[in-house]
Amino acid sequence: MSATRRREGLLGWLFVAPATLHLLVFALFPIGYAIYLSLFKWQLFKGTQQFAGLSNFAIAFREEAFWNALWNSARYALVGVPLGMVVALAVALLVNQRLPGMSVFRTLFYTPAISSGVAVAMVWIYVYLPETGLINSAIGLVNAVFGTRFPTSTDFLARSDLAMWMLVFMSVWTGLGPRMVLFLAGLVGIPQSIYEAAELDGAGRWRVLRSVTLPLLAPTTLFVLVTSSIGALQVFTPVYMMTRGGPEDTTDVIGYHIYNEAWVNFNMGLAAAKSLALFVIIAAVAAFQFRLMRSRLEGYSAT
Amino acid sequence: MRTARSMLSKALSYLALTALGAFLLAPFAWMVLVSLHPKRAPIPTLDRLVPPDPQWSNYSLVLLSENLPLSRFFLNSLFVTASVVVAQLLIASLAAYGFAKLRFRGSGLLFAVFIGSLMLAGPVVQIPVFLMARGFGWLDTYWALIMPGASSAFSVFLLRQFFMQLPRELDEAARLDGAGDFRIYWKVVLPLSRAALATAGAFIFFGVWTDFFWPLLSTSSTEMRTLEVGLSVFKNSYGGSYWPLQMTAAVIVMAPLLLVFLFTQRYFVKGVTLGGIK
């Protein structure tokens, strides 16, 4: 018996060996390597590595641009994630009804998520253009029909007070599909009998949503919250394609900031230090969300 | 009274969904319509959006352009994506079988490390993996584009969830017939998991095909660019002056994605249900 156990143990390791090796080489070793790099002052392509202790971290934390980037990412995530989740949940509730044609809508709403991020960014540059852009032309159309005089010259991506919110708005659009599908999966898991019981008790729609659907959906909500937050803190492509961090660094999010530090300034040690700071922030945010939701969940089961 | 209300609510639902669908599709529709305007035309206003004389020649112009070897980008994307899908399905399904069907010391901890890396490793590994690829001499080659994606914790997780749902009686029956684990994996579990493999494959396909950051970093010559990076280079080199041609290129990049999605869309709902938390 113990011989077969041992054989099974060996076999188990054999099966997971290729994936584990890959994990070691492309995830675990690089994390260690990043920690090592963060201790050196080093310009890629020129100069040698100089041991610098923790000074890269000290430099990063004293840099206004780094804090600005963190603040921008915080704004992007704190507004974009809740907004995206509320919209996705509303859409999931709509397409979860037993009505003909719902699967068509589900497919339709998923499309932005499988699209080329670069092509999508190119189209959204147009959406925000002054005068000829989709939003401004639509305003122009309203003006023509109703005789109003709303301005049609707003250059949404060039305004330092607006550009970030334009990226946020776009993220609601691109992130809708996966979030909706996750919520749908959660909704399907709620037993129909609970809804019937609530209806017998005379609960209205709003009440059912608040007292039955949302609490039972909490694990899904947590999962969506954590994955969306992690994604939002790493956003890169739309910033790279649409605003290049501007105007006046108001959309210089941390993912783009680190990219510049590493691949434009070539400060590899400093960039590694900043990426480690982001790593810690992401881990902390995820852990915090798990704790928060766990205490909420316990609250529900107690009442 | 009651039916009238439910009719109204149905009508409102459809109205909301259609409005949202139109909102989601508007940018795509615009992309296609603008791509058919004369190549030097300014951005059309909404009332002139439908081109009176569609310029299909834009497509042959972009497809055959020498500044933009789209066919080469397409072949690069195809080769890289196909290699990653095959490698990742193989490596991840092996690991998923190990985690789902075999008991071995340290498997719980190892699986937790996989999941942890899935959630956290993203931003930290870019610089080290680039330097490693440079050290291996992989930069600007297919190795750099393929190897980092040859396995992923996400696929391991997804396939493990599915393998755990397979009834144990099936592999026990095969075991009684004298089949070993590799045989059971290959002859029993994989054939039963076609839907799960298709799901994982679809996720991998879209993830790799539309990946932008890593191919941007790890390639530098035009011949090694993937479609996604090639499109961004095209956009930046034309600097916004030829909108119709830019949109033509965008449509060409989007078309294969939409086509593949049409055939695989049902797996997306399934995959998320599988990977989701229960």
Image: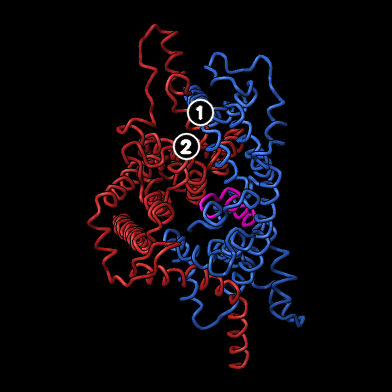
Place of residue A32 in the rendered image (x, y in percent of width and height, measured from the top left): 41, 72
Which kind of residue does numbered mark 1 sit on? Answer: Phe
Chain drawn blue in the picture: B
Q: Which residue is mark 1?
A: B23
Q: CA distance from mark 2 to mark 1?
A: 9 Å
Secondary element under disc 2, as helix, strand or loop, is helix
Secondary element under disc 1, as helix, strand or loop, is helix
The crowd level at tag 2 (other Cα within 10 Å; few <14, some 14-19, many 20+) is many
A115, B247: nearer the viewer: B247
Which of the numbered marks, if any, corresponds to residue A210? none
Q: Which residues are magenta?
A: B199-214
Chief secondary structure of the magenta span? helix
Name the residue rendered at 50%, 56% in the picture: B276
User: Is B183 above or below relative to A188?
Assistant: below
Which of the numbered marks, if any, corresponds to residue A173? 2
Name the residue rendered at 68%, 44% in the picture: B260
- Which residue is at the far left? A62
Which kind of residue does numbered mark 2 sit on? Answer: Trp
The crowd level at tag 1 (other Cα within 10 Å; few <14, some 14-19, many 20+) is few
| Count of number-bearing discs | 2
Chain drawn red in the picture: A
Place of residue A275 in the rendered image (x, y in percent of width and height, measured from the top left): 37, 60
- Which residue is at the far right? B177
